[in-house]
Amino acid sequence: MSFSKKILKTIDGILQICKNPWLLNVIINQNENWEKKTPDFYKKGFKQVSLDQLFPNFDGRLETVAFLDGGSLITDLLLLKNACKEFEQCKYFEIGTWRGESIANLTDVAADLNTLDLDINDYKTYNFTKEYANAHGFFIRNNSIIKQHLGDSTKFNFAGLNKKFDVIFIDGNHHFDFVVSDTKNVFEHLIHENSIVIWHDYGFSPEDIRFEIVNAILKGVPKQFHDNLYHVENTMCAIYTPKNFDGNVLKLYDNPKRIFSVDLKIKVEQ
């Protein structure tokens, strides 16, 4: 590209940002920019552990999978299920419900199920469409087993729960400040010495790290726990576990170390 064309392109870019200031956030939040901010030790993300390392008696059964936008991979859902099975009478807390797919799969492995999501007034505050708001909680409506807490997680009184949880799933707003806030609240108010904390969307995919989330986790988690942060292979999740594992470094396009067998059945929702 010639120098004059570069100048014209720069001017056009500035004009577009002036007309649409939100474009500046798109530029700032590009993954490459977050990668540059990441401490050198974490440039390749957290150490990786496999599902079978974490859970030698891995249970691969699920009853509710939608395969729709904003949901989780099968392996993400199985990570949550097997984490809950580590505890007798598991106490589970989830930030960010969406359709309720994740927590719906835990009714047979957790005794105390809690989810936190926005209420209808919060949807209006964030200008979400009516259709988007109505999609929330589809799988858990009228489910008396699941306690649904409503509110903005940045304003929610976590201390008021007066309870510690065995497994906590952070899957709310994925912007940096929100993830930091949710993470700090979880580690300050909800964990005990054996708790497991799981973050969704640590990766855009199992092999594509989302560095905004990496940086948010590192800022939100107390430093004494950083050595116990891992990326769970074949998932889009990061995990904190008090147990120590020999991890490995993500290698892009590496050959699969494990393969999974899947037996799907279709249930039609009326």
Image (cartoon, grey):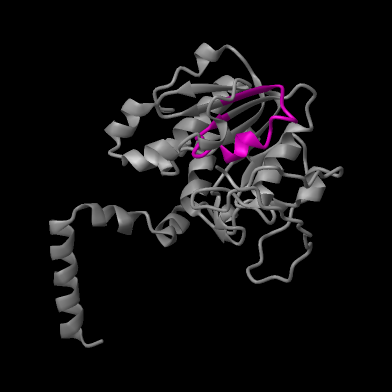
Q: Of 198 and 124, which appears nearest the observer?
A: 124
Residue 228 in sight: no
Q: Which residues are magenta?
A: 94-114
Q: Single out the residue that lies furthest toward the bottom.
A: 2
For the C terminus, the quadrant is top right
Q: Is residue 204 above or below residue 267?
A: below
Which residue sits at x=63%, y=47%? 65
Q: Is residue 143 above or below residue 9?
A: above
Residue 235 pos. (x, y %): 65, 53
For the N terminus, the quadrant is bottom left
Q: Of 58 and 264, which appears nearest the observer?
A: 264
Residue 73 pos. (x, y %): 62, 52
Residue 175 falls in image quadrant: top left
Q: Of 128 and 37, which appears nearest the observer?
A: 128
Q: Is residue 250 above or below residue 69?
A: below
Q: Is residue 187 magenta?
A: no
Which residue sits at x=77%, y=40%? 244
Residue 56 pos. (x, y %): 86, 44
Residue 76 in sight: yes
Which residue sits at x=78%, y=64%? 257
Residue 139 pos. (x, y %): 56, 36
Q: Single out the residue that lies furthest toward the right.
A: 57
Horizontal side, residue 81 vs residue 98: left or right? right
Q: Is residue 109 magenta?
A: yes
Residue 101 falls in image quadrant: top right
Q: Is residue 175 above or below residue 1?
A: above
Horizontal side, residue 209 vs residue 77: left or right? left
Q: Single out the residue that lies furthest toward the front.
A: 270
